[in-house]
Image (spheres, rainbow, N blue to C red):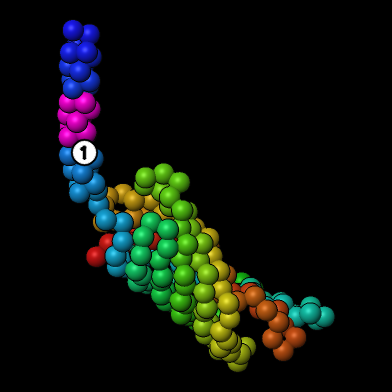
Amino acid sequence: MKKIVLSLAVIVAMSSMGFADEYVAPVESEATENAPEDKGFYVGLAYSHLSHDIDHETLTTKAELDFYGLMLDVGYKFNPYIAVEARYNFSLGDTDMDDQVDEAEMSVLSFFVKPMYPIAPEIDIYVLLGYSLTDASNTYANASFDEGAFSWGVGASYDMTEDFSVFADYTRYYDDTLNSFDHVNDSFNIGITYKL
C-alpha cells in the first residue's frame, strides 16, 4: 500500500512540473516576440555650436571663433551596445570675433564607431571614436584650415518613443599644433534621431 501511495505521489509531482513548464514557456516566448528590435538604420538632425580656437605657442596671438550651425547624421545600430555613424556639421552665417563680425565659416565631416551602454531602458550613454575632416576659413584674416585627425566625443540619448530619440553630446574634432599654432576644433550638439 505504501508503495502505491508513493508511486501516485511521484506521478502527481512529475505531472505538476510538466504543467508548470508548459505554462511558463509560452509567456516568455510571447514577451520575446513582442519586444522591439534594437538595431537598424537611423538619421538625425541637431543644433550645433562649433568652435575653432587658435593659439600661438610663444606669441600673444589668439583667436576664438564660435559658430552656430547644424549637424546631419546617419548611422546603423548593430545591437544595444555598438553602432557606426557618419556626421556632417556646418556653420550658418559668420562668426563673432573680437566684437567684430568676421567673414568665416566651418564644416566638419566625421566617421565614428559608437560604443553604447544602456543605463536604463530609455537612456543610453555613448562614446564616439573616429576620424574627422575639418574645413575652416577666415576671409578677414585671409586664413584657412583644412586638416584631418582622430576625433572623439561623449554623450547621452533618451528614447521618447520606439522611433524617436533626443541626444546631447560633446565632440572634439582636432587638437594639435600646426605651423607653431595650437588648433582646437570642437562642438556641442543637441538633436533628435529617427529610427528607419
**As drawn, 32 above or below 11:** below
Q: Position of residue 136 (x, y in %)?
A: 54, 84
**As drawn, 69 above or below 3:** below
Q: Is residue 109 visible?
A: yes
Q: Residue at x 17, y 29 (%)?
A: 19
Q: Which residue is mark 1?
A: 25
| Residue 64 shown left or right of residue 73 in the figure | right
Q: Secondary structure at mark 1?
A: helix
Q: Residue furthest right?
A: 58
Q: Position of residue 29 (x, y in %)?
A: 21, 44
Q: Position of residue 97 (x, y in %)?
A: 60, 75
Q: Is residue 94 visible?
A: no
Quarter of the figure with the C terminus? bottom left
Front residue of this view, candidates 137 and 95? 137
| Residue 133 shown left or right of residue 25 in the figure | right
Graded by Cα atoms within 10 Å as few (under 14), some (14 to 19) or many (20 or more), the crowding at tag 1 reads few
Count the labels in the image: 1
Amino acid at circle 1: Ala
Q: Residue furthest bottom?
A: 142
| Residue 21 shown left or right of residue 82 in the figure | left
**As drawn, 117 above or below 57:** above
Q: Is residue 83 magenta?
A: no
Chief SS of the magenta region:
helix
Q: Residue at x 82, y 80 (%)?
A: 58
Q: Position of residue 81 (x, y in %)?
A: 42, 58
Q: Which residues are magenta?
A: 14-25
Quarter of the figure with the N terminus? top left
Q: Residue at x 17, y 13 (%)?
A: 4
